[in-house]
Structures are given as C-alpha cells and as structure tokens.
Amino acid sequence: MDKLDAIFSPQTIAVIGASTQKGKVGHDIFANILYGGYTGTLYPVNPKAKSVLSVKCYISIAAIPDPIDLAMIILPPKAALGSVKECIAKGVKGIVIVSAGFKEVGGEGALMEIQIKELCAQAGVRLVGPNCLGVINPSKKVSLNASFSARMPKPGNVSFISQSGALCTAVLDYAADKGFGFSKFISIGNKADVDELDLLRYYHKDPDTDVVMIYMEELSRTSEEFVTEVREMTSGTNPTHVIVIKSGSSVAGAAAAASHTGALAGSDAIYDGIFTMSGILRCKTVNQLFDYAQAFAANKYPTGDRIAIVTNAGGPGIIATDMSEQSGLKLAKFSEETVKELKKYLPATANFHNPVDVIGDAAKDRYENTLATVLADRGVDAVLIILTPQSMTDAIGTAEAIVKIAKNSIKPILCAFMGVVDVSDGVKLLQAHRVPVYQFPESAARSLGALREGMKWSFRKILPQYDLVYDRDKAAGIIDKYMKEGRKILGELDGNEILNCYGFKTIPTVLSKTAKQAVKIAEKMGYPVVMKIVSPQILHKSDAGGVKVGVKDADGVEMAFETIMKNGRAYDPDAQISGVLVQKMAPEGKEVILGVTKDPVFGHAIMFGLGGIFVEVYKDVAFRLSPMGRNVARRMVKSIKGYPILKGLRGQAPSDIEAIEKNIVSLKAMVDNHPMIAELDINPLFVHGEGEGTTVADIVIRLEDGA
C-alpha cells in the first residue's frame, strides 16, 4: 500500500480540535466528513466536549480504542506540535494540519513547522499542510470530504492539487456549475512534507485519475528531480496528463543583470522551461485550466492536426477556424466521397466544404448525419461542433445525437453550444456523458489544440544522446586562475579559452593597446576585421559605440581604434579601458544567442533564441534546465518563433541546427562542471550552413565566489 492511501482512503479518522460551535473550522470539517457520507469510522477529539454533532468525543487521540489512519489537526501551532507527538505515539499513518500560523508567518511558527516535519519524517508518517483546506475523495467507496468546503464534488477522472485553500473553494463551486467531477482533491498549503511531486506519483498510479490539474505558487523540488520523474508520467501509451496554472511570476532584479540572458530571465521564464521539459501543459487562467481538463478527461486524442468544423452559423465557424490555426491545427480537406455524402443530407444553400455550415434551421438529424459523415473521412482527425440557439434549434436533440455518435468514435468530438439558457439542457447532457462542451468556439478550438500538443508530447521521437568530449580539467584551471586574480567579468580574450575546452569554435582575437599595434595585428590576421572595446565596466559594447565591424584596411583600423576609445570614455568616464580587441571577421551566418543565468532555486538555466542587437526587442528566447540532453536541446531550438529562419526561408539554405543543439548541450555541461559561472552570454553566435558549424562572435562570462 502507498502511504498516501492513509490520506485519501482512510478507514478511520480522528478530528483533533473538533468543535461544538457551528462556523468554527473544527466544527465544519467534522460536519463535512460526517454529512458527506464518509464510509469509515469518525472520531472527534476535544477534551472540553462530551460530543460533537451527537458523536461521542474523546479527550485525546490516545483515548480512542481503535487504530487511526488519518488525523485531521485543527489547533494553533503550539498545540498542533503536541498533538503530532501524540499521533505518532498512537501509530497514526497520515496527518493533515489545516491550521495556519506556521512558516507563512515566520518566527516561532516557522520553527514549529520544521519540528513537526522532522518528527513525521522520523516516524514515516505522511504530512499534508500546515495551512491547507484539507482533502476530498468523492469515490463512493470512500466519500470523504475532510475539508472546510461544504461542497462535495461528484466523482470524475480528474484530480486537483492546490497550494491555495481559498482558491479550492472557488474551484469546487465553479466545477459544480460545470458538472465537472473529481477523482481526488487536495490543498497542500505550506508543503512541509507532501508536495506536488509526491501527489503526481500517487495520481499516476491511481486507476481513477487520468488528468491532474495544479494551482502552483512555487516548486520546492530541484528542476532535475521534478522534470526527470514527471516527464516519464506524461509520456508513453498510458500517460497522466498534467495541466498547471502558475501564479506569483516575477522578473524583479532582472534589470540589474550583467547579461542579456539575465535581463530576459525571470521566474516565469524558468517555470515555462520546467513545465515544457516535463510535458506539463501551462494555462493562463482558471477558465483555461477547466477547458483543457475537460478535453483531456474525455480520453480521446487526435492522431493528426486535421479538424472538421460543423456549424449552424458562419461567423462562429470563422472564429473557430482562426483559433484552430493559431492553436497549431488545420482544416481537413474532405474527400470527394464525403462531399458527395453531405450533399444528400444538407440543403443546397449549405456549405459542403470545411467548415461545414448546416444552416440556421438545422434540426437534430442534419447535425447527426453531418457529424457521422465527416467523422468517417480518413482525412479528419477530430471534429468541432458549433451550435447557436435559433428559434428552430433543438439543443437537447442535437446533444443526444452527438452523445450517441461519440460513444462509438475514437476520434475526439468537442462542442461549442453558444449561449446559456436556451442550450443549458443540451450542455448538461453532454457534460453527463463526458463530451467536452464550451460556451464559445475559440475555447473549444484552443482545447483541441492542447489535446493535439499532449498527443505529440506522449509519442515524441527520442534520439540517442550526443557523444561529446570536453577538457574539463583545462577549463577548471583557467577559471581557477581568473578567480585567484580576482577577475569576475571575462570577455572574448579570456572567455574564448574556456569555450574552446567545450568544443565551441572561436575566432582569432588579439588585444591592442595602441592604434599602430592594432594595425599590425590586423595586417597579420588578414582583413576584414572586427574591433571591440575591452572594459569590465562596459559589457554591452554596442550600447557604448564600442564595436566596429568589417574594417578593411590600415586607415580604417586606426580610425576605428580612436573612435572606439573616444566613445568608451564618453559612455563611462570612470570605466577602465584595457584597449581594443582586433578580431578576425567571422564567416557569414544567422545570428543567435546562447546564454546562462543562475536561478537561486533551480540552478543554471540555458537560454537560446535569435541573437544580435534585437534580442531584447523581440525576446524570442526559450529557457531550459537540467536534465539537458540532445532531445531537450532539439525541442528548445524548435520552440522559438524564429525557427523557420534557421530552417531556411524563401529558398535560403538551412542553417546547421545540429551544431546549435550540440552547443546547447555543451554549454549546460560546462556550467554543471563549473558552477562558479553565474551568467554567460554568447551573442551573437553565428550559425553557418548545414554541416558548417557555428562561430562565437562575442562572449561575456560573470564568475561568482562560493559556488
């Protein structure tokens, strides 16, 4: 048995802090368990009461004659700590602490939470909370509402995890209105012990759970542990689909970052990377969370991206078409047989091609025949049905027809029954039979796109890892030397040495102190050259007018040297300027950026995107963390909007995308091996034609002590 069974399916429960006073949490939780039809045995614990709601009360948990699976504790922190000790002595298997006043308030409360956590860990007792709503299991075998929400949801195949107790009550109310059912429902509060990963492991093994909804404020695990486990759960032939809404995003402190990467990274960008790597679908609103969960709960998935739209009004059909394309779907092209069959059932004024307009006077049979026909087309992977309430519309009859066809179809059918009152009976019927139904067509189309993304993730191609060789010891020696010298900001002259140890191709670069010296270097190197200012205070050289590209002769080199030095002094009179770098001009290529930022919680995150001077304007970048391998790197490159540029637009030759992938994997290995690298920018990294590799054009590395 799983230890969390004591939380979700206890045979005996003690409510410690049960109250006789209605409106108190201790009373309402006890009442909710009692009146919710709990199938086990319930014991109130309160030394000052004889009974609660006519149930005999016990002075302590030790006084209860039977073994206890779950203890619900509704006591202030100090009393809760004592109660936990008594529960452990009693042999309780699971504890839920509903009370607040712990870590979230700091001070003594935070210390007591740590003590409780340690006591439970030593005893092998699973702990939920403190500061949580409780736990709900609507299964008829258990019928447990151990929470302070009076509403018991109906059973379903979706489980819910929330850090916020207050949001839970609103979600339960919203779900009841939508006819939405749950398998398990839990609020985890401060996560002293049980957290999202524990629950995802449990839900993945739970035969009653197919989909998990999460409201998350923060993740308490390392990204590597979380991603490694969760992506196994969300993959393969029997995945658990996970949908999350994440609050509390912040980019505070990004403006102070030394690199482009640091400025673009915020907690939200990091979480996006974690969710993407885990196969978790992210939502922006609670509405969207329910929309996607409803679609996945139907357990039918499109094997391709071709959809058919059936509507009784042209406008909504166009809206659905637009949103479908934005969601990565495309309209299916019907076969001649399908069009011929449609003409048998539809009036001459109808549209027989996709989207199919069955006309406003469509009754049940017209919808039924049209749906059956387009579903049978081999070029159709899913169907979106739109119904607008007109005087002749039969919403309930149409819903009955859809339900009948959906039972025998492996292809997903999503509905948009527009309106509220006139279509409500049809909507309820569809909900009762787990046919996804939405109020507006864009919600249905977006949810269908999410279904397709989930299917693509589950059956994504897994490629063998790259076999790359690095000179870790040499790089460590170089970094150690700079650290001992107190040099924390490294430019091309220094940073290139480190990059070379990890397989990056750099270009000849020499520092010049005078204009004449710069000319000699350029003559030896060969024209054209690039010239750049060198100063630890001027990191973004272009901003200071400190870069000259394509210098072709000696006169140009002298002039560029003087201009760069003059611009640098004007930009920052206090800057220490070491001179001007003379660099061999890099071969032509597309400009991308590779970067590293160090998140205080999750460690090093790698950034990739379109590079050059526009990186902070377009912000077309993606972040990924550990574990980093070839497959993560490949999907990372494909995820940016500018990917088609690298693939080759309008007859242009494709870029060496595999070389970028190898660079990403190598960069992550480099910062893993040398954690004192706090930030890094390679901008631009020139990507040449397929098979021709990449070239580093500019590099900034910031080192830190104590890593």
Image (cartoon, rainbow, N blue to C red):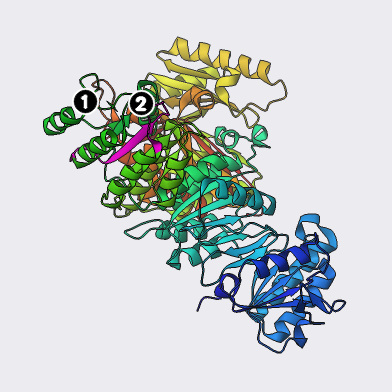
Q: Quadrant of residue 634?
A: top left
Q: Specify whether 131 is left or right of 455.
A: right
> Exactly how many numbered labels are in the figure?
2
Q: Is residue 628 visible?
A: no
Q: Quadrant of residue 451?
A: top left
The x and y percentages for residue 323 are: 40, 29
Residue underneath mark 1: 352
Report the disc number at residue 317.
2
The residues colored magenta run 377-395
Could you tell which of marks 1 and 2 lies nearer the N-terminus?
A: 2
In the image, what residue occupies the spot 27% across and 50% down?
410
Circle 2 Cα neighbour tier, 10 Å, few/some/many (<14 / 14–19 / ≥20): many
Q: For the residue marked with disc 1, what is the amino acid? A: Phe
Closer to the camera, 115 or 381? 381
The x and y percentages for residue 284 are: 54, 39
Report the disc number at residue 102.
none
Q: Quadrant of the C terminus?
A: bottom right
Q: Quadrant of residue 445?
A: top left
**In the rendered image of this protein, does residue 324 appear above or below residue 212?**
above
Q: For the residue marked with disc 2, what is the amino acid? A: Gly
In the image, what residue occupies the spot 63% across and 66% down?
36
Closer to the camera, 170 or 7? 170
Q: Specify whether 254 is left or right of 54.
A: left
Closer to the camera, 193 or 579? 193
Q: Specify whether 570 is left or right of 363.
A: right
In this view, which residue lies farthest toward the bottom?
65
Circle 1 Cα neighbour tier, 10 Å, few/some/many (<14 / 14–19 / ≥20): many
Closer to the camera, 409 or 56? 56
**In the rendered image of this protein, does residue 67 appear above or below residue 153?**
below
Secondary structure at numbered mark 2: helix
In the image, what residue occupies the spot 78% across and 60% down?
100
